[in-house]
């Protein structure tokens, strides 16, 4: 069997149903084998970065590693941003790059390059992958594929890269017998956790104001159902990180809101008032805690659950550590509290709901003419019950969406967290709708980020994908413009000065996608009706937002997380 025929067969056996790619010389054998097998959909993108983002979203949606392919040289390097996104946000993915023939590799020669487009993608990718390997012989291929998929899904999920020289792709190999199970990653034994679970039970019983901080590790650890059951059992209110927007439905009475730099003010105030914080699969970075780490960790007991020991007691010290998967923790915790009577938190929930009423997300932005973006997000979600997912780009609109999205039922909400890459939402929307069997997806983007991968509108049209695109257009790079307003006396170089955007409705029309623009509150209802007039067809809605509308609330940098702009002012310049 030809090596690439084996790869096509093996990918299908592992549950891969779509491969995202941009064609190039060094992957022509792979593409031909996939085509001849007629089992896996080949979805051609218009940039390799977009193919990587689509694979990222597919991996998050299904739990089966998303797969993207690219040719050597620029094709492979264009994947790197998407590979990094998978790595930082714990998305299972396998990336396959073509490489020049083995005799064209420079190896130890003191030259920069031997073969045309030869590039050492393995060395470039290693810091942002769980593993990156170049195949050195045809016989390696089956076992390396086995290891790549296993590694991508076990422990903390992430990307693996396989770089396959062109001559190896053409070889014939014998199909191997089924492999033995790969050894499981070493974990922590149950006995190591007995003391901390006993401690948690006592602390939970004595707590007056407990909170759970839900992070992206819950979804990455395939623990969503266990998490929801645990929340019901304990009755503890839940705040979430940016990557955990969809763990509890919007109308769940225990769902409080997002915490952090741009978190809901009431959620940050609740965290500041809490006496117990149970952190599940969240790494407590500066965007969650604010810069005043001492305030975050004092006056409350913190139990931190993470599968990576290095993430615990890193920035926030003094946490009681449970090193292991969230699902493992919940199973052990449920057994510990099975017959226990836990305190009822009605008074604490009432206090939080009073904060929510007092500090509504609709009143954070000073009154201005035009459309309040937080209000618009609520209207968008109310009109989008048919959507299976929201994919959200990076910028001010990302924060407005995170503050105000009403994610219902089993809807998903996906964004680029750790990498924070503009241009994520549209290709991620393509990956998400493919993963859901062409269920409609809402893409929420800003005018700046949307232009980074705007070319994928052609992918949407060519594949007739039911993607509803919302471009919140404030005619600037708004998040950095807000930074310049705070720290550079309103010198808006490269965010407003020297920046421009097209008429996106006209752009969509040139690709054959219908669209409309709304600029006034009274136009929004009609615009949303147009967006969903035909759920099966793509549509672009451009929403005019005032250029100088800021994303509030925002932690005043240098102050504790309960002191937020615009009511408080930063006392130091942000470094992140």
Image (tube, rainbow, N blue to C red):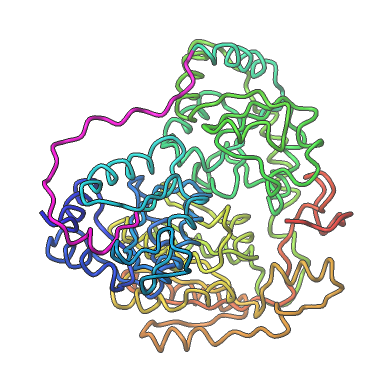
The secondary structure making up most of the magenta span is loop
Q: Is residue 384 depicted above or below 137 in this figure?
A: below
- Residue extending farthest to the right is 571
- Comparing 506 with 573, the one in front is 573
Q: Percent x, y for residue 242?
A: 59, 50
Would residue 37 be found to the left or right of residue 471 on screen?
Answer: left
- Residue extending farthest to the front is 110
Q: Is residue 214 depicted above or below 109 in this figure?
A: above
Q: Percent x, y for residue 564?
A: 80, 52
Q: Residue at x 26, y 30 (%)?
A: 181
Would residue 114 be found to the left or right of residue 102 on screen?
Answer: right
What is the span of residues highlighted in magenta in the rendered image? 162-190
- Comparing 556 with 19, the one in front is 19
Q: Percent x, y for residue 407?
A: 50, 52
Q: Is residue 164 depicted above or below 291 in this figure?
A: below
- Comparing 320 with 162, the one in front is 162
Quarter residue 120 falls in: bottom left
Would residue 33 be found to the left or right of residue 214 on screen?
Answer: left
């Amino acid at each position: 069997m030809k090596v690439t025929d084996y790869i096509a067969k093996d990918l299908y056996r592992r549950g891969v149903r779509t491969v995202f790619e941009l064609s190039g010389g060094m992957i022509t054998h792979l593409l031909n084998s996939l085509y001849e097998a007629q089992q896996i959909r080949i979805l051609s993108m218009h940039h390799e970065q977009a193919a990587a983002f689509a694979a990222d979203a597919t991996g998050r949606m299904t739990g089966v590693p998303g797969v993207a392919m690219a040719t050597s040289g620029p094709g492979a390097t264009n994947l790197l941003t998407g590979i990094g996104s998978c790595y930082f946000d714990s998305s299972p993915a396998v990336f396959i790059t073509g490489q020049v023939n083995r005799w064209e590799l420079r190896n130890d020669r003191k030259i920069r390059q031997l073969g045309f487009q030869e590039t050492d993608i393995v060395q470039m990718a290693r810091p942002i992958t769980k593993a990156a390997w170049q195949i050195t012989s045809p016989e390696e291929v089956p076992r390396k594929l086995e290891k790549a998929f296993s590694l991508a899904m076990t422990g903390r999920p992430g990307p693996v890269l396989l770089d396959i020289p062109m001559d190896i792709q053409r070889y014939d190999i014998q199909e191997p017998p089924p492999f033995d199970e790969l050894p499981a990653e070493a974990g922590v034994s149950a006995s190591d956790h007995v003391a901390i679970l006993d401690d948690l039970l006592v602390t939970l019983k004595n707590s007056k104001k407990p909170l759970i901080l839900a992070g992206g590790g819950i979804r990455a650890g395939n623990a969503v159902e266990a998490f929801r059951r645990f929340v019901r059992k304990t009755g503890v209110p839940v705040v979430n990180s940016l990557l955990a927007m969809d763990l509890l439905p919007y109308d769940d009475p225990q769902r409080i809101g997002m915490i952090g730099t741009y978190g809901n003010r009431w959620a940050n105030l609740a965290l500041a008032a809490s006496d117990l914080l149970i952190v599940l699969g969240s790494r407590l970075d500066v965007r969650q805690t604010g810069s005043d780490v001492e305030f975050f960790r004092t006056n409350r007991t913190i139990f931190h659950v993470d599968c990576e020991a290095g993430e615990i007691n890193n920035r926030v010290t003094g946490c009681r550590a449970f090193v292991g998967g969230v699902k493992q923790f919940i199973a052990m915790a449920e057994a510990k509290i099975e017959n226990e009577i836990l305190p009822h938190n009605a008074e604490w929930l009432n206090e939080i709901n009073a904060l929510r009423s007092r500090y509504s997300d609709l009143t954070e932005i000073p009154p201005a003419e035009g459309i309040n973006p937080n209000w618009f997000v609520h209207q968008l979600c109310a009109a989008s019950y048919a959507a299976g997912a929201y994919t959200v780009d990076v910028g001010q609109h990302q924060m407005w969406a995170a503050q105000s999205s009403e994610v219902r039922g089993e809807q998903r909400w996906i964004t680029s967290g750790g990498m924070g890459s503009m241009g994520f939402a549209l290709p991620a929307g393509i990956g998400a709708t493919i993963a859901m069997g062409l269920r409609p997806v809402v893409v929420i983007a800003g005018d700046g980020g949307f232009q980074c991968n705007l070319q994928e509108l052609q992918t949407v049209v060519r594949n007739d994908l039911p993607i509803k695109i919302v471009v919140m257009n404030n005619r600037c790079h708004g998040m950095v413009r807000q930074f310049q307003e705070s720290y550079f006396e309103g010198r808006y170089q490269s965010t407003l000065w020297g920046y421009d955007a097209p008429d996106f409705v006209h752009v969509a029309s040139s690709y054959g996608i219908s669209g409309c623009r709304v600029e006034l509150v009274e136009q929004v209802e009609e615009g949303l009706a147009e967006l969903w007039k035909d759920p099966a067809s793509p549509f672009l809605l451009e929403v005019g937002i005032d250029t100088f509308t800021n994303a509030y609330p925002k932690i005043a940098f240098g102050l504790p997380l309960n002191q937020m702009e615009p009511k408080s002012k930063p006392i130091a310049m942000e470094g992140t």
